[in-house]
Image (tube, rainbow, N blue to C red):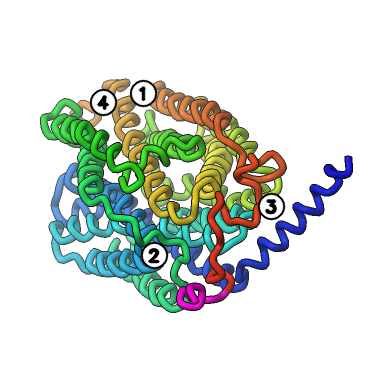
Amino acid sequence: MEENQMKPAASSQGQKQNLQQFDLAYANRNLILFALLAASVMYIEIMLTPSLPSIEKQYNVTIGQVSLILSLYTVFGTAINPIVGKLGDIYGKKQVLMYVLVSYSIMVTITSFAPNFTVLVISRTFQGVGLGIFPLAFSLVREQFPRQLVPRAQGLVSAMFGAGLALGLPVGAFVANNYGWQTNYHIATPFIIVLTVLIFFAVRESPFRNPEAKMDYVGAGLLGVAVALVVLGLSQGSYWGWTSAPVLGLIVVGLMLFIPLVPYEMKLKEVAVLNFAQLRQRNVLVSNVLGLISGMGMLLAFQSIVFQLEDSKPVGYGFDIFTTGLYLLPLAIVMLALAYPLGILISRIGVKPFLIVGSIIGAIGFLLLAETHSALEIAGYLAIASVGLAMMMVSMQNLLVLSVKPREMGLVTATNTVFRNVGQSLGAPIAASILSTFTLTLVFKGQVLHPPTTAAFQYTYYVAAASFVVGLVLSLLGQEVMGKKAKSEFSVETTNADNNEEIPKAIGGQNDSEAKS
């Protein structure tokens, strides 16, 4: 009985010691910088989507060609993410982040002044390096806060993702329609450059590094090419044709590259960019598969909603791009409103309850979307689905970063980004396949049209709902990392930092040289 009474006091004392090891004023300043960075990057990436028809006309290219602007960005970013994450773990996350930010700033500037379509495609492709910003930023945020404050810090960054989305769609469409799509870039580019400079001077290097580790360039190259080929094939299937030689060739060759890659990586063990021992950790595995499933379901439903709102009547609602952006705002507003409060609640209650509840609410929201009869219902039910999506995304990120050692976090979070991007690449072709399979025949002004049926949209929402049901099952398999039910290996009372790795005093305000001395 006496031992049980001592536990709360020990817990409180452990948390106080844990807080004293961190410079919270410094951490909060950096958190604001990274939150603004997340909002700016998300705005830049989403603002281009409503402008694709304008770009198509401006450069006199086809729909398939203009789609490369989006797909090649994702392909390059997905391929380079494991390399960026691994380099961050070896040489320092801030140092690698600076290289990424400078490269991203240059590519964004070139895109804003692209004189022709070729330059635009090339700059947009290498702009995909920006996807490496998030794993490194999430890792730095994770290191600078005590464990009990990490969820609210991650929640704020996630909330700013929502802010970028909330501004990007309607504002991007408004600016593009009135002043041209490149004006969006002219407005946003200075913010990225200023944030890059501020981060360079304000953020200290990560104390968690593994300089004795070696970079697995062969494995990283094989993995990058394999993932890039598969993602490119999936993203272009609806434009080039799913049975066309280029699409099938890209997917088959990409998958075949995994045949030599897997045994090669298994021999390297800890050095490998595909660290199977790490990937098999329960929470890492659950987070990665959740990222794949939620990414697929979200983009599948997102694409279907856009088509349903913009397709001509009687199939759709015949909205223009700007109006469609307004109806999609609930997705962004919910993310913005819920992400930070969720972080606070997760630190008190735990991660798993929100993963489970989020999966259930997300599934209900998509099932309701399947039964809509008006555009307003679409907006309302999308808001419900977005509540579940926000819960799942914030919880999933915390489940991942609170389950691994800080010196491994760059590669782990980068790999999780790869899984999410692959899932999103799967979502778009699945939606396209369903919408192109279930069609009706209409004759309009002498032209024969084959728009999707109402049932086609319903099927896509059913698939999205099913993905969240799978997410529910996976959520039950995760191990709790926060709250009273956290497993002992994830306990906040341990004086050793996260998973038996000591917190260097550099986090408390010293630089690396001071910490070493």
Residue 202 percent coordinates (x, y): 47, 76
Residues at discs 3 and 2 in contact (Cβ within 8 Å): no
Check disc 2 and give the amino acid type. Answer: Gly
Check disc 4 and give the amino acid type. Answer: His
Question: Which of pointers 2 and 1 lies earlier in the amino acid sequence?
Answer: 2
Q: Which residue is mark 1?
A: 453
Check disc 3 and give the amino acid type. Answer: Glu
Q: Which residue is mark 2?
A: 92
Q: Which region shows up in magenta?
A: 509-517
Note whether 464 is above or below 69 in the view shown. Answer: above
Residue 477 percent coordinates (x, y): 55, 30
Q: Which mark is residue 450?
A: 4
Q: Secondary structure at mark 4?
A: loop
**Front of the two marks 3 and 4:** 3
Residue 392 shown left or right of residue 18 in the figure: left
Q: Which residue is mark 3?
A: 493
**Front of the two marks 3 and 2:** 3
